[in-house]
Image (cartoon, rainbow, N blue to C red):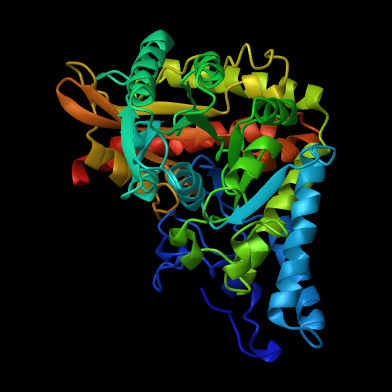
Amino acid sequence: MQNLFKTPCNLPSTEQLLLAGGDARIAVDPLSGLNKYGCGPFPDPQLLAFGSSTASIISAEGFAAADRLRQKLLTALGTESPSTVYAREMQRIRQECLRLCDLSDVTGLELIFSPSGTDIHSIASQYAGSGASAPALAVMVEANETGSGVASALADNTVEIAQVSIRLDDGTPRPPAAIDADVETLAGKAVASNRRILLILVDQSKTGLIAPSPACVIALHRRFPDNIEVLVDACQFRIAMPTLRAYLEQGFMVALTGSKFLAAPTFSGMLLLPPALAERFQKRPFPRRLSSCSSKADWPTNWTGAEHLDHAANFGLLLRCEVALEELRRFRAVPQAAVIEFLRAFAEAIRQRLASDPHFEPLPVTPLDRRPLIEPDNWDHLQTIFPFLLYHPQPAGRTPLSREETLHIYRQLPTTLDLTDRNSDIAAIRCQLGQPVACGSRNGAAVSALRLCLSSRLIVETATSSDKGIGVIKNALLALDKTAWLIQSSVNEV
């Protein structure tokens, strides 16, 4: 990692900074101006954005927040070094993030910044195996439900990977008891060999599942406290603040990103470490692998081992985290009662449409039950990710779209098709859904699910409008209209 510039006058533009300090996944195609997630560095208010389980276009408010911070950096860099400015600003964001998450009162709680959720998993796994005599075992749900790069980020000479399926061959959720049983078996064998275990609880997966159950993970952690460390993969950030605190109080570390539910630009990650675990990690050797992907200011002040890190200024990460904070500020200002009321109305409308339209099949999602961790009385026990399969209606019966056909439909959703027939209004709709996720097979054909998702930004929009969310629901139904129209008109072109 290197400083993004040598002199203050070379500070890139806001849009350039938003694309810097990550990896190839956020680089934009020179022709489309979009990255691999279909997002660019500028606001696009005409796009109906319901793809926050993958990524979102930056909002006008978010871009303005990033631009204000860039102007602040320009002023500071006139008299101070990039590393000094970067360290101060990252500490400011660290403190404000803890405040917005209602965690400022937790003494010893530490926050580590990292470009992506994949990198966060790498930090957790490297510390799980640091200084151990045998490779640690990372137990996680299947990679297609978390992230394509997570498994590779975890696996190396110090960590072995064991994946557990959370959906059956037909895409329906496995019974939670069966998932828990697999996890318990894997953990028990590893403990018998006196190995360290990184147990990853995903809350929520790409298709909106929690697995393994919090009850299972809590029991295993209490039974084998010397062998098991728990990472809660909450990178979707679809959890309320009491839930976040409850996980930390169990002694679990929690991975968050600002790029999913909060709809900030991709590559804005954070790892929260509860006090006892932070103290334990600092007694272990600092993993060498982390030296190439971290700056000193990304780590807590006086973190053991971090003093040897580069003092590079990753202003791209800084600006993206600032956008995430802006979106979190706006969401926290919405009363929870209003959030819950809208989520219920939205879910009713979307479930009804998915169940009644022959082009769709809603993919089952188990209830978001985190007991005994916490009672389901916050907004985060309500569904915000709605996965569904695509079908081509035929006189003899419905035929599921293949994975290739589903991907073809997905890629056309953000485009405008210039037609003069009576469907031109639908063709002109530009929308964004969550990327296809492999979900078993139908009639012997491998299928993928698209995902219609709510973001904090859409919830804030309902709170600042006079229609109580009717406009957002209408736009979501329009996105499904466009999807159904594409199936009718384009599937044969694949």
**342 up-or-down from 154: above or below:** above
- Please tell me which residue is depicted at 20% across the width and 46% down the height of the picture: 494
- Please tell me which residue is depicted at 73% across the width and 68% down the height of the picture: 87
Q: How many marks?
A: 0
**220 up-or-down from 451: above or below:** above
**97 up-or-down from 41: above or below:** above
Residue 356 spot, x, y in % from top left: 43, 16
- Please tell me which residue is depicted at 74% across the width and 26% down the height of the picture: 242
In the picture as drawn, the residue positioned furthest to the front comes out as: 133
Residue 27 spot, x, y in % from top left: 44, 67
**To which quarter of the image does residue 100 belong?**
top right
Name the residue nearer the viewer: 443 or 197.
197
Name the residue nearer the viewer: 110 or 330.
110
Is residue 465 visible in the rendered image? The answer is no
Name the residue nearer the viewer: 393 or 227.
227
Residue 363 spot, x, y in % from top left: 39, 21
**378 up-or-down from 476: above or below:** above
Q: Is residue 104 left or right of residue 86?
A: right
Q: Is residue 339 left or right of residue 261?
A: right
Q: Is residue 171 left or right of residue 51?
A: left
Is residue 352 visible in the rendered image? The answer is yes
